[in-house]
């Protein structure tokens, strides 16, 4: 046993070397970029000054602490990752206040070939909103005005940087509410939900995905040109191109949304199941068989509840739904949901537990961080028809590891679900950290193999698309090359990857191998 | 469960979760304790997930839009400094450390339960040790160390206000007399003379009321006097040290703590009343810690003490300028130091609700989700411009609140004559008063001591 420490260090070294090789490749590419940077430097010096002509100096910052803070997101990465990521630090942050100044800023960047990264609240993870080539961070949060609320038409026009919470609070004064928004609504922004999938969350099962409620939007293209795009736009870019493509085609600056009205009744039903199959059948039945769709629908594993709650339902799986409707519809839905549950031997869950879960729904995915130093996770976009297959694979794989694992699913629309899997660990424990990543990687491979996909792509997951969805990538590439041939705006998302699939695969295989030996030797 | 059946009002239905969950603090009862060992508390930032949920409550962030100004962004910097990913730069780091009001709202909403206040106060301590301190802060520090107050006023002038206040003057002279008597008794061998006497009340004034806001010290003395409380002042009173504690100068504050603590212990009082929420929270937290958890005397904020007295003496309270049918409409602003720091939310409300001729309406953000007025954590002193903006917002919210109240009043065909924003902290009062004044706001801002002083207490 005296050798344990030495062995651990060796494991760590092998993984670090592996990682170093990957970093080197990225660094070489950065060197090429850097030589181009030198040419730009002269103009860069004047860049900050030039943009201060149309953006308040207070909102143009090169403070190194601010750059550090704004160049990151929730993604848990160990420190050496951050060191390599240093190449990805922005060199300036700009917070434009309106479409015009945003357009002027982007024109300037285009002219000087400065890379640009769009940042809203940075909650989408997987480095979606962090720089990949340094350059300028365009912080959208000041473009946050409510331009117009039309209670008659039930529409609202807003700056894309408005947080959902602010929008929701203002609309409630008019008896109105957005149709769909993410559970991160306390901080995430309208533009961010449009640019990420926007396909699962609060209101989605009932009213449809984010794109369904967009009537029109203003897009500032990578070259700074302003374009108004509506549902029926026939131009070069359509709403479908913009939704879920991580800002690679332009910055959404204003959005017109259709709304719903506030409802008068809120009902919650929840049942515990010991059988996974029954739980999934119930979950699917709530979407398919109850006449009024739930406002929110979720399925979670017992361990997910356990890692954040003192008291929690005993059964292995919890399925719960929220009906937000008029009183008649809501109570009809509840009766139907109760009938379905009794057919499947569901055990009714304490109402106060469900009420609290709904009250703090935004915290659910984060609160399990009370149990661990760091949250490491992946999000899978699974067809409800293959949900059981995915979960069975998940259970088989997770039984092999000792670190805490949990899963939590929320419903999208039309038979799809976002399954989130967490590994609770500490990034300081390198070997374990990489094994958690390897476990999530195995689930990703299974996801694609069974015909499904990942939910959030960002920078970190793009290499999966290149490997498994090349046709889709090529389609997207065509438009990207047209609009942004120099790949200045939000580069390394969807159409071009930072990392190579085979290298990552090798790294994770090695990590699992080491974990296995480590476990065998020291159990 | 049917919220719809239980509560008909549409606003009640929506406030039990989304759509309008942002106004309520997350419930904690059934959540497991965060994985923070007590000795690790100052390293709690390591657990920050950077979820950003503390952004929406951070008034500084919502004014500056700067990523380093909210808790998650600041935690990111601490992590980067720890890992040596970023160099420590005395000048450049100052705004990210000091542009925080230490209002504690981020602590209330943090899903992983990080004690952000502890983390940020420790961070300030650490950077001060490394020589990073805003220039204005060093002026404040020097003044406190030389003059026992941050306003560069002479220590001997601390009780000048007593000259014009009958109750204050009596309390000051009473204190002097009693201290002399204790000294005499001790000299005569009565070693018990310094022991706290039951119900002997002291009033700790604080620097701001002593030198700048004499209206508060006058109102408080009058209220205590009118209630028949024979209180004493502390002629040796010095700055409580709050500013130093909040700005990372804890070592410098300790002398003041020792002196004030000794002074109170030697005066023989068993109850100490505060009109300043800043002093009250410093005694509740730092002084109590210094005394090993037991001070040897009880602490009361004025609102708590008046409530206790009114109940004990079976008194009623009336606001004579208005009637039950035509009450003065007021809204109450929770000071961070009284609310989030000390958990005093209900006593001020209970007291206000007891006053005949006054009606209390809540602002949207209240109790532990109350917005900070903008004056805390040294932000007012160091970044007055930011504080002004935040204060303006709080007033705007009050106005919206008043508009709703007015609409309700209109519905009932009654007339509103006045609107008042009441707080129970001299800093909140000052900041909000200043903004209301500058903006020519129709809302009158006053401290609760002033409101109470305009009231009558009767059997
Ligand atoms: C606790 C938690 C809960 C979550 N719940 C959900 C959920 O229920 N459903 C769900 O789908 N996701 C969820 N997410 C993921 C994330 O919150 C959402 O994707 C959210 O919509 C991102 O918004 P944001 O403002 O943080 O955008 P960011 O993360 O800042 O940006 C996301 C991407 O969009 C781009 N972008 C941002 N603004 C614009 C713009 N104006 N124009 C063009 N591109 C832009 C960015 O460059 C980036 O690529 C959750 C995340 C967390 C941490
Ligand atoms: S709410 Fe807590 S975990 Fe989230 S960013 Fe703020 S401090 Fe970090
Ligand atoms: S203590 Fe208040 S001002 Fe400071 S970061 Fe937290 S919410 Fe913002």
Image: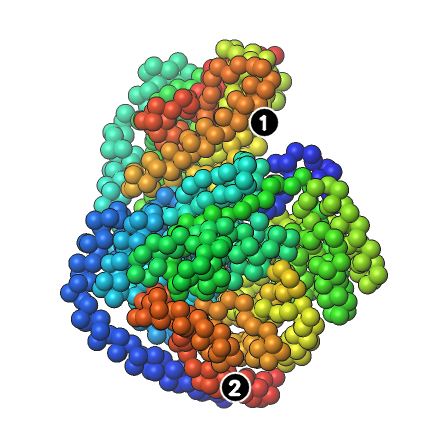
Q: How far apart are marks 1 and 2 (CA)?
A: 64 Å
**Does label 2 lie on the same chain as label 1?**
no
- Say which residue appears at 74% left-offset and 53% top-offset: A291
Residue most extreme to the front? A234
- The structure residue drawn at horizontal position 74% and vertical position 38%, both measured from the top left corner, is B5
Q: Position of residue A270 (x, y in %)?
A: 73, 55
Classed neighbour count for the residue bearing mark 1: other residues with Cα under 10 Å, few (<14), some (14–19), many (≥20): some
Residue A296 point in image, percent of width and height: 64, 54
Number of numbered discs overlaid on the protein picture: 2
Residue placed most toward the observer, B20 or B353: B20
Give the left or right position of residue A334, taking residue A376 as reference: right
Position of residue B347 measured from the top left corner of the image (x, y, whole percent):
56, 30
Which element carries disc 2, helix, strand or loop?
helix
Residue shown at the point (77%, 54%) measured from the top left: A337
Q: Going 49% across and 26% down the picture, which residue do you hit? A: B402
Residue B184 in view here: no
Q: Label for residue B350?
A: 1
The N terminus of chain B - image quarter? top right
Question: In this view of the protein, which residue sits in the foreground, A129 or A6?
Answer: A129
Q: In this view, does B68 lie to the left or right of A463?
A: left
Pointer 2 indicates a residue of which chain? Answer: A
Mark 1 or mark 2: which is in front? 2
Which quadrant does the C terminus of chain B fall into? top right
Q: Identify the residue under disc 2.
A: A509
Q: Is mark 1 on a helix, strand or loop?
A: helix
Answer left or right for B123 relative to B289: left
Q: Is residue B275 above or below residue A327?
A: above
- The answer to whether residue A520 is seen in the rendering is yes
Establish if A431 lies above or below B64.
below
Q: On the image, which quarter does residue B13 sit in?
A: top right
Contact, CB < 8 Å: mark 1 with mark 2?
A: no
């Amino acid at each position: 046993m005296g050798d344990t420490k030495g062995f651990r260090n060796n494991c760590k070294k092998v993984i670090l070397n592996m990682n170093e090789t990957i970093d080197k490749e990225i660094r070489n590419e950065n060197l090429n970029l850097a030589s181009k940077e030198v040419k730009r430097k002269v103009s860069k010096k004047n860049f900050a000054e030039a943009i201060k002509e149309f953006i308040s100096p207070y909102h143009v910052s090169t403070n190194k602490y601010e750059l550090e803070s704004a160049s990151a997101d929730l993604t848990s990465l160990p420190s050496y990752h951050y060191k390599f990521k240093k190449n990805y630090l922005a060199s300036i942050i700009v917070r434009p206040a309106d479409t015009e100044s945003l357009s002027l800023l982007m024109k300037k960047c285009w002219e000087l070939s400065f890379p640009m990264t769009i940042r809203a609240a940075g909650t989408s993870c997987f480095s979606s909103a962090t720089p990949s080539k340094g350059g300028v961070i365009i912080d959208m949060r000041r473009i946050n005005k409510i331009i117009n609320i039309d209670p008659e038409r039930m529409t609202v026009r807003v700056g894309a940087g408005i947080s959902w919470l602010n929008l929701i609070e203002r609309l409630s004064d008019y008896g109105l509410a957005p149709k769909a928004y993410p559970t991160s609504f306390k901080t995430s922004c309208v533009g961010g939900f449009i640019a990420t999938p926007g396909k699962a969350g609060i209101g989605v099962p009932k009213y449809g995905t984010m794109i369904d409620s967009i009537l029109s939007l203003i897009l500032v293209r990578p070259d700074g040109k302003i374009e108004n795009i509506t549902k029926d736009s026939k131009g070069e870019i359509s709403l479908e191109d913009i939704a879920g493509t991580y800002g690679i085609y332009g910055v959404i600056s204003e959005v017109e949304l259709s709304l719903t009205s506030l409802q008068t009744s809120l009902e919650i039903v929840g049942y515990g199941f010991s059988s996974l199959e029954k739980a999934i059948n119930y979950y699917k039945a709530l979407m398919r068989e109850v006449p009024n769709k739930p406002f929110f629908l979720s399925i979670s594993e017992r361990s997910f509840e356990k890692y954040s709650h003192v008291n929690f339902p005993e059964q292995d799986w919890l399925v719960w739904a929220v009906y937000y409707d008029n009183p008649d519809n809501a109570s009809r839905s509840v009766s139907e949901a109760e009938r379905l549950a009794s057919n499947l031997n569901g055990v009714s869950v304490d109402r106060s537990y469900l009420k609290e879960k709904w009250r703090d729904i935004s915290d659910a995915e984060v609160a399990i961080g009370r149990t661990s130093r760091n949250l490491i996770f992946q999000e899978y976009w699974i067809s409800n028809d293959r949900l059981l297959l995915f979960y069975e694979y998940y259970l088989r794989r997770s039984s092999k590891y000792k670190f805490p694992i949990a899963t939590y699913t929320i419903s999208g629309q039309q038979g799809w679900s976002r399954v989130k899997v967490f590994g609770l660990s500490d990034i300081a424990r390198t070997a374990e950290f990489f094994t958690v990543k390897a476990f999530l990687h195995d689930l990703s491979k299974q996801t694609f193999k069974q015909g499904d996909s990942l939910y959030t792509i960002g920078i970190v997951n793009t290499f999966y698309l290149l490997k498994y969805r090349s046709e889709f990538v090529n389609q997207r590439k065509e438009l990207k090359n047209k609009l942004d041939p120099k790949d200045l705006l939000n580069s390394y998302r969807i159409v071009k990857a930072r990392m190579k699939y085979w290298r990552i695969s090798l790294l994770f295989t090695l990590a699992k191998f080491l974990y296995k030996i480590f476990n065998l030797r020291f159990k | 469960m049917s919220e719809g059946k239980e509560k008909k009002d549409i606003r009640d239905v929506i406030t039990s979760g989304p759509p309008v969950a942002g106004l309520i603090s997350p419930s904690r009862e059934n959540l497991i304790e965060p994985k923070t060992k007590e000795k690790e508390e100052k390293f709690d930032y390591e657990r920050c997930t950077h979820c950003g949920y503390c952004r929406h409550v951070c008034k500084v962030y919502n004014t500056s839009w700067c990523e380093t100004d909210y808790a998650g962004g600041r935690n990111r910097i601490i992590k980067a400094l720890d890992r040596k990913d970023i160099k420590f730069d005395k000048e450049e780091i100052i705004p990210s450390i000091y542009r925080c009001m230490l209002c504690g709202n981020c602590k209330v909403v943090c899903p992983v339960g990080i004690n952000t206040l502890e983390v940020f106060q420790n961070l300030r301590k650490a950077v001060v040790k490394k020589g990073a301190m805003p220039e204005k802060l060093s002026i404040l520090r020097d003044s406190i160390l030389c003059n026992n107050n941050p306003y560069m006023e002479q220590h001997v002038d601390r009780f000048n206000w007593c000259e014009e206040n009958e109750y204050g003057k009596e309390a000051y002279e009473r204190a002097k007399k009693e201290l002399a008597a204790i000294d005499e008794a001790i000299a005569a061998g009565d070693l018990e003379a310094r022991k706290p006497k039951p119900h002997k009340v002291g009033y700790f004034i604080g620097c701001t009321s002593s030198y700048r806001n004499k209206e508060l010290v006058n109102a408080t003395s009058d209220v205590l006097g009118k209630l028949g409380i024979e209180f004493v002042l502390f002629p040796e009173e010095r700055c409580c040290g709050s500013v130093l504690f909040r700005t990372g100068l804890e070592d410098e504050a300790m002398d003041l703590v020792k002196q004030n603590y000794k002074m109170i212990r030697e005066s023989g009082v068993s109850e100490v009343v505060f009109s300043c929420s800043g002093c009250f929270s410093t005694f509740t937290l730092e002084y109590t810690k210094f005394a090993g958890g037991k001070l040897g005397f009880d602490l009361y904020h004025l609102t708590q003490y008046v409530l206790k007295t009114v109940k004990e003496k079976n008194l009623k309270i009336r606001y004579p300028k208005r009637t039950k049918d035509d009450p003065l409409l007021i809204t109450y602003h929770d000071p961070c130091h009284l609310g989030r720091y000390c958990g005093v939310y209900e006593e001020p409300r209970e007291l206000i609700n007891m006053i005949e001729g006054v009606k209390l309406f809540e602002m949207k953000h209240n109790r532990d989700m109350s917005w900070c007025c903008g004056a805390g954590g040294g932000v007012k002193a160091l970044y007055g411009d930011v504080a002004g903006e935040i204060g303006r917002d709080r007033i705007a919210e009050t106005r919206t609140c008043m508009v709703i109240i007015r609409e309700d009043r209109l519905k009932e065909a009654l007339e509103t004559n006045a609107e008042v924003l009441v707080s129970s902290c001299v800093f909140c009062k000052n900041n909000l008063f200043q903004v209301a004044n500058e903006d020519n706001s129709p809302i009158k801002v006053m401290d609760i001591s002033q409101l109470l002083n305009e009231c009558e207490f009767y059997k």
